[in-house]
Amino acid sequence: MKSLILALVLFAAPVTQAAPALSNVSSQDFEDISKEMSANFTHNSMLGAAKMGTLLGVQVGLVAASTSTPKTNDIVKRNADAELSNIYNAGLLVSVGIPFGIAFEGVLLPETKASGASFSVTSLAVKYNMNDLIPILPLNLALRGFYSTANFKFNQTISSVDSSVENKTSISGLQILLSPMTPLIDPYVGIGLLNASNTLEASGSAIFDPSYTTSQSETKNISGTQFLAGVDLNLLLFKIGAEYSQAFGTSKYGLKLAVGF
């Protein structure tokens, strides 16, 4: 399963000539990294506002997303002959819907390694379709709360000093989702409020600009609004989803391939 997810994500794609490298990271650099990492690892089940079945619904499949990271790429290019114009997010999706319009969602990926880097993702959510509560609604209305954590690690050598760099991200959020009541296709839009905490740390050489901090580890807390739009296509047992989202000024595109009922 890990190899299948790895192939889907093409995790090695960002590294073109050399591994990423960070040094002299300023306060603004760290804020830019935190925003793009947080946008990438925000929960992405690619499920809309509709209920999952009348009494019970299940989906199991794979999700993958690519996030544009132009500012992180500028920082990486400044420090090494490398490119990191996109970062990736993927995992095994498991979602279960129960009566009263409640659904539980999980996107999970154990530590996966490629090209000297690794990442892992755990993202959990609860969605509540409100149409039973407000039966006169002409469309699907749902609330979804989620909590996601992710680790991104890589090794680097700067001035002949080997270092290990780790970025830890945690994001919580609440989304409002809307979609029409159509039977086979669920196009949806949503808006969310996000809170994220991003920690960047290194062992070995220092990575931060000394005028910013002399610490080997720093944490940045950020908040913002998320906008998303997607579609969930139901073809008997097969489910195909696609989603665009924007958070912290960063765009992400995702795809889902799943089976379910």
Image (cartoon, rainbow, N blue to C red):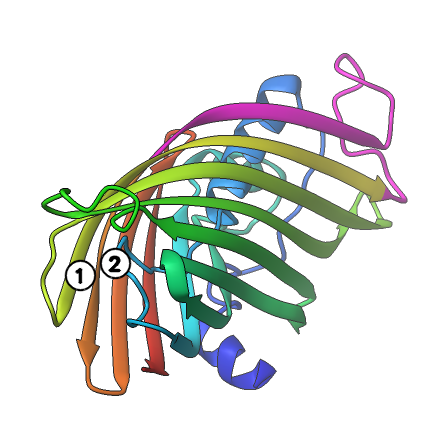
Q: Are marks 1 and 2 in contact (CB under 8 Å)?
A: yes
Residue 27: x and y in percent read 65, 18
Q: Residue placed farthest to the top in the image? A: 211
Residue 210: x and y in percent read 80, 18
| Front residue of this view, candidates 224 and 186 | 186
For the point 77% across and 12% down, the residue is 211
113 displayed left or right of 162: left
Quadrant for the N terminus, please.
bottom right
Question: Label 1 belongs to which residue?
Answer: 186
Could you tell me which secondary element the residue under label 1 belongs to?
strand
User: What range of the chain is rendered magenta?
Assistant: 203-226
Tag nearer the camera, 1 or 2 = 2
Residue 154: x and y in percent read 71, 56
Residue 200: x and y in percent read 73, 37
Q: What's under tag 2, amino acid-wise? A: Ala
Question: Label 2 belongs to which residue?
Answer: 50
| Front residue of this view, candidates 259 and 256 | 259
Could you tell me which secondary element the residue under label 2 belongs to?
loop
| Front residue of this view, candidates 155 and 56 | 56
Q: What's under tag 1, amino acid-wise? A: Asp
Among the 4 quarters of the image, the one containing residue 136: top left
Label annotation for residue 49: none
